[in-house]
Amino acid sequence: MQIDPVVLFFLLGLAAGWAKSDLKLPSALYETLSVFLLLAIGIKGGLILAKQPVLTILPQAVLVLLMGALIPLLIYPLLRLRLSQVDSASMAAHYGSVSVVTYAVGVAFLARQGIDYESQTTLFLVLLEMPALMVGVVLARIGAGASKSGHGWSKLLHEVFLGKSMVLLIGGLLIGALAGSDGIKPLDKLYVDLFKPVLTLFLLEMGLVVAGKLGILRKHGLLVLGIGIGLPLILSWVGIAFGLLMGLSLGGLTLMAILAASASYIAAPAAMRMALPEANPALSLGAALGMTFPFNILIGVPTYLQFARLVA
């Protein structure tokens, strides 16, 4: 079976990192690529969202918010078997939130397979960034240890809603929806045609970053491995179940599984660092970025398609 070139770029970065190569993308370029991908995903979703009736999407959006709040509540008791309350809450927030890049790889994978999907899944991506972060903080703050963090809810809400990823995703969504296909046409060469080439460069850098995070396995080993691979496989079925409730197609079910199975390594670490400074960031980031992200990119995405085919 031919491997998607997008995945091969990630493997190149991973191999270069393992080999201690001096390969590294300039930090300014990495930031630029991040901004581009977030804007492009938002714009692409907004273009199709403009054609969707609001009354059709609203019930689905409510279900997505419910899923985002439910996932951390489901996995928190499991994490508490091995982790402290604060670390369990932080990890639950990471896995209740989503990975934009994993979603982008899933979209590229479906396009390569010729499988259509509902355009509102981009809106779901934006919505899923928020509820898990809030639930994670609540879970931690119900304990005495986390109540000493001293950070107000206003600061947390500012971090969640006005963080870079949310501003770019929501901004792109609004630009695409308000401008429409005709208005965006002069820009589609950049934000549509160049999306996948830019994604390859971003994944090259992500491979280098992941290689640097695998050292956490020496300390936490089986725990991180179990969380990083076990949780995505379980949570993908949660996404499929909610996708069935929404009446989504095969492609939509697959993307819901990908969203549920992915873990945030951008928005969640920033929010948890501010709200729960007692939590161990290496543990959450090691599992989310060191294990779950490469597992989803290499194995998870095609596996979730097969899961969706079983019920579609």
Image (cartoon, grey):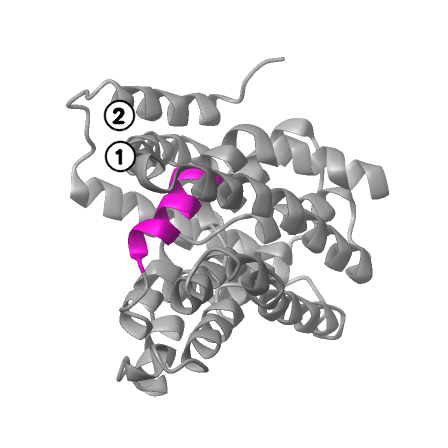
- Residue 221, how many percent across, how many down? 40, 37
Q: Are marks 2 and 1 in contact (CB under 8 Å)?
A: yes
Image: magenta residue range: 280-292
Is residue 6 part of the magenta span, yes or no?
no
Above-or-below relation of 283 to 23? below
Above-or-below relation of 161 to 248? below
Numbered badge on residue 17 = 2
Residue matched to label 1: 212
Which amino acid lies under the numbered mark 1 shown in the image of this protein? Gly
- Residue 161 or residue 76, whichever sits in front: 76
SS type, badge 1: helix
Above-or-below relation of 131 to 92? below
Classify 10 Å Cα crowding around label 2: few (below 14), some (14-19), many (20 and above): many
Numbered badge on residue 20 = none
User: Quarter-wise, where is residue 242 in the image?
Assistant: bottom right
User: Quarter-wise, where is residue 230 in the image?
Assistant: top right
In the picture, measured across the screen, residue 19 lies left or right of residue 233, that is left
- Residue 171, how many percent across, how many down? 42, 66
Q: How many marks?
A: 2
Residue for point 47% across, 21% down: 5
